[in-house]
Amino acid sequence: MHLDAKIPGGPLAEKWDRHKFELKLINPANKRKFEIIVVGTGLAGGSAAASLAELGYNVKSYCIQDTPRRAHSIAAQGGINASKNYQNDADSDRRLFYDTIKGGDFRAREANVYRLAQVSGNIIDQCVAQGVPFAREYGGLLANRSFGGAQVSRTFYARGQTGQQLLLGAYSALSRQIAAGKVQMFTRREMVDLVLVGGQARGIVVRNLITGDIETHTGDAVVLCTGGYANVFFLSTNAMACNVTASYRAYMKGAMFANPCFTQIHPTCIPVHGTYQSKLTLMSESLRNDGRVWVPKTAGDKRSPDQIPETERDYFLERKYPSFGNLVPRDVASRNAKEQCDQGKGVGETGLAVYLDFRDAINRDGKDVIAQKYGNLFQMYEKITADNPYEKPMMIYPAVHYAMGGLWVDYNLMSTIPGLFVLGEANFSDHGANRLGASALMQGLADGYFVIPYTIGGYFAGAKLPKVSADQTEFTIAAKEADIRTKRLLSINGKRTVDDIHRELGNILWNYCGMARNDAGLTKARTLIQSLRSEFWENVRVPGSDKDINQSLERAGRVADFLEFSELMVVDALTRRESCGGHFNEAFQTEENEARRDDENFCHVAAWEYAGEGKDPVFHKEPLVFENVKLTQRSYK
Amino acid sequence: MSWFVNTLGSSIGKKLMMAISGLSFCGFLVAHLAGNLFIYGGRDAFNSYATHLHSLGPLVTIAELGLLTMALIHVLTGATLFYENLQSRPQRYAVNKSAGGRTIGSATMPYTGAFLLLFVIFHLLNFHFVDKTHITIFDIVSKSFSHPAYVVFYVLAMIIAGIHVSHGLWSAFQTLGANHPKYMPVIMMLSLVFSLIVGIGFGFLPIYISLIA
Amino acid sequence: MTKTINLTLKVWRQPSTESKGGFETYQASDISTDMSFLEMLDVVNEKLTMDGKEPIAFDHDCREGICGQCGSVVNGRAHGPEKGTTLCQLHMRHFSDGDTIAIEPFRARAFKVLKDLMVDRSALDKVIQAGGYVSVNTGGTPDANAIPISKEIADKAMDAAACIGCGACVAACPNASAMLFVSAKVSQLALLPQGRPEAARRVTAMVRTMDKMGFGNCSNERECEAECPKEISITNIARMNREFFKAGFFSATK
Ligand SMILES: Cc1cc2nc3c(=O)[nH]c(=O)nc-3n(C[C@H](O)[C@H](O)[C@H](O)COP(=O)(O)OP(=O)(O)OC[C@H]3O[C@@H](n4cnc5c(N)ncnc54)[C@H](O)[C@@H]3O)c2cc1C
Ligand code: HEM
Ligand code: SF4
Ligand code: FES
């Protein structure tokens, strides 16, 4: 199969305009005749559903939570990038584009990323018009801060709750369309399958999480905005319900999965402190604006931090990367923290932590200024750890945070299944092998507000869409299969709980497919996953029934898919014989322990096709062509 | 006029009626207390105040009718609110604990209110709807308060009135939308002072009268 | 440092909306004081599962105090005893060995119990749908810096916008009133110039819908403010009242 990314011709900066002009239009009166299924109400799904409904399409929207406003995007703290150049520091679309491509270690598509930079400014305009209360300066204009991987200040923020405010903006637009009757909202529904009719995506199967009913829903196109799969690691900064089920089911139906091994490990999270732990908490990257990362110079130094004199501290990021200092990209910061801990210099009870110290910033700017900037984060840290970061340096350690990989999409955000569009974190498109801070919110909203409204019209204008109904065999069979699967999970009645198995899966991935990988470990992980999967299907215990609310059953379904998907991750990691961004294979590193790319052989997107149960997935390649940037060894020195 | 009914009939509209009628009572209390202070001037001072007041004629009637309207509004709306609020949580909590927001005043508004209604009726029957052709108001009052039970009941009622307005006054400002970080603490303080004035100001009178009687 | 405690839990169990619920008693043993309250419930649930019983159903998602999905009444307090804290951010170090903890769902006529500690808070969404938005379509909006907004106003709007929609204000209010939640959204949009054009229509529609949903009437008890995990202030309620009177008596809105 040939992967056609459908990148428009012409110069980079003109591609999107040109494409918008060339896309066929649907007359406003005819838009009413189309019904679009949008799964997910995060930044991507919420903005898409609202914008499509505003255009006149009939939209059905779905989410797992009890209200669309609680999608995981709500948890994003730090900010959203835009190339507004409000700070007069020489920012531009081109610079944002370049930073993002470079930050992604040159494994993203130029045209997509440029488009992202181009619409980034519109996003901020849109959000302000919706009433998003971004931080402002005394003069009344918008404030900015800096994020990792950039030397300009282009991040817009709303205290430490940027994701919340952006999502509430999208949610309000969505609510308006629900009230107008243009969006039908289905909450507490979990998509468990995609339905194809005549090779086109024409509907979904969902489980009603209140009644347990398996429901089928039809549409003329399906837009997946179901977020990332970082929870495959069990412990991550993601919300508990984040899953790969929707994406993985689409993959099983023929959508290709791109770069599944590209996962991001975020450097500044609260370290793990017990086996009962259910999730990890992120401390926003913005803290690295003022916090300094250090470890004791000598391994095994167990003195309390205030006893360690300046000369015996190693500010390793500042030392190794003088020009970016503490603001190096996430993959670099994480790997360096791990390296220090591996050398025995880690701090805290477990030795798996480094300090993030605000002492100097507090001495320089005063406690009040620091409290204004980070007060709520400091408070959150204190709530969890019972330590006061104003007095004692924070202890941080990397944690799984984000999935750059996702379903493969072309320039129109359509997957390899006609009529199946994928937006936001669920697709693979814009962040290459590593995402820069404050870019996911930008991408989710760009996809939803400013890309899909145009490109879906192009699809409808060119597609033949016969009428479908939920009584058709394609739907009844899919529903039946979903039902059988649920019943099977309930009937095993083994000796291990779902969480117990999920935790073990997480450990396997963290140890062998985490921050640093090697062939032996990955190979081992593959067999471990396979045997854990068989154990799951023989020995898991899922209590309760399928006829009402059953949270264990919900989790079991998700973990079953994680157990399949994790193998795909490992296979992808084994196949990519280079290190880049979040994928660091120890066999491929420079003398200074930096990731060594192999642009000659691996400058491509790895897209995997499902080959059937028990069969190895089939590899496809979309070569990446760089016409506007020079591929260089990423350097933040 | 549907806009008018819609606005006043809403939850916030009902609160508005409570606030305005409640504030008018507070105003009345101030006037009433000022008048009652003449008691400290002795029999003649108080009686001449009463005659003076009644010489105002129709003005008094208008004021009385106004107060009666306000009373009807306050009592009926208060009862509606109380009933609706009971309905809004059909299944109660097994464990109830305050987070520190409520006060004795706020938690007991309907009960102190109901008590005040009974009191007001009793009070009017006692001192207002009585034949005053052969006896002056001062004598009625001092005769009544020679019974210790009367004194106790009146003092109690005044303490309860104080409790009612200790929440009522600031709450009325909040309801009207007058909450400003600079002024709210002052209003809160004023409510407290006002409730003390009402409680002590009115409450001490029966004691004083019973002592001189 | 890490310490463990033993607790007795009295948990409200109710299989479905229609069924009658009641309290069940469970022992939570060897609970690390570093655990969050929900992690403690996870531990209890793992044990219930292995004992062949149904685990306790409770809502949660982000577990970092921002999604608003979690929440129960713990010993009579919505989200438990700590100020400005959601249930997921409440840590067991605030309890002592041997404590008995009563856990009940948020209760209000407008919030039906779905199962155990899970309730239906969709009434809050209905209120937002009535007008909790600025009616702008995607595209065609002016430059973000076109209208300067003073920092003071932007900060106040942000204070109000911090509401996570958890419904604890309703749960904590002796009258089950939703005024704090509704006023937070009304205030945010009434403060910002972008929200002014339809301020009158918005507040009228939202208050009417709030009333229709069966919430109680505010009597300024201030329990909401004291319990709100985001410490939303009742000055927002006063602002909403002002907006409502303005709309009702002085605008064209009917
Ligand atoms: C703690 C944290 C902080 C972050 N901070 C930042 C930041 O500061 N800046 C930044 O740019 N990015 C940040 N990110 C990343 C960013 O928040 C996410 O990548 C982005 O919000 C994802 O948005 P989304 O719309 O794609 O998906 P989500 O917001 O995850 O939404 C997924 C939606 O899909 C629904 N769903 C999922 N599966 C199913 C299913 N099977 N059936 C039905 N519905 C389903 C869910 O209910 C939900 O509505 C952060 C991430 C985390 C975890
Ligand atoms: C001297 C007489 C009284 C005075 C000065 C008075 C004053 C007030 C004031 C100022 C309020 C506050 C309104 C608000 O919160 O907006 C109030 C509330 C209330 N009053 Fe009275 N009141 C009096 C008598 C009564 C009586 C006789 C009743 C009997 C039914 C009553 C019942 C209530 C109730 C139930 C409330 C609370 C309403 C609510 O906030 O929901 N009051 N009162
Ligand atoms: S106002 Fe506070 S308590 Fe009420 S819903 Fe919002 S965050 Fe929760
Ligand atoms: S689980 Fe999200 S706020 Fe508690």
Image (cartoon, rainbow, N blue to C red):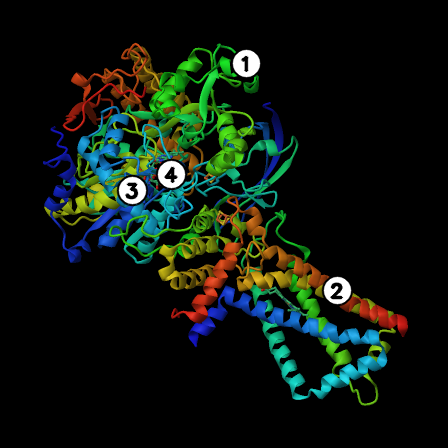
Mark 1 to mark 4: distance in Å?
38 Å
Q: Which residue is mark 4?
A: A72
Residue B69 at what x, y percent from top left?
60, 78
Residue A302's disc number: 1
Q: Amino acid at mark 2?
A: Gly
Q: Nearer the viewer, mark 1 or mark 4?
A: 1
For mark 3, name the chain.
A
Q: Amino acid at mark 1?
A: Lys
Mark 2 to mark 1: distance in Å?
65 Å
Which image quadrant for residue C25? top right
Residue sitting nearer the eye, A171 or B31: B31
| Mark 3, secondary structure of its residue | helix
Q: Is residue B40 above or below residue A549?
A: below
> Going 40% across and 27% down the picture, which residue do you hit?
A234
Return the disc, 1 or 4, that comes first in the chain's sequence: 4
Residue sitting nearer the eye, A305 or A445: A305
Q: Is mark 4 within 8 Å of ligand 1?
A: yes
Mark 4 to mark 3: distance in Å?
14 Å
Q: Is mark 3 within 8 Å of ligand 1?
A: no
Residue A445's disc number: 3
Q: Are marks 1 and 4 on the same chain?
A: yes
Mark 2 to mark 3: distance in Å?
61 Å
* CA neighbours of label 1 inside 10 A, class few (<14), some (14 to 19), many (20+): some
Residue C157 at what x, y percent from top left?
44, 50
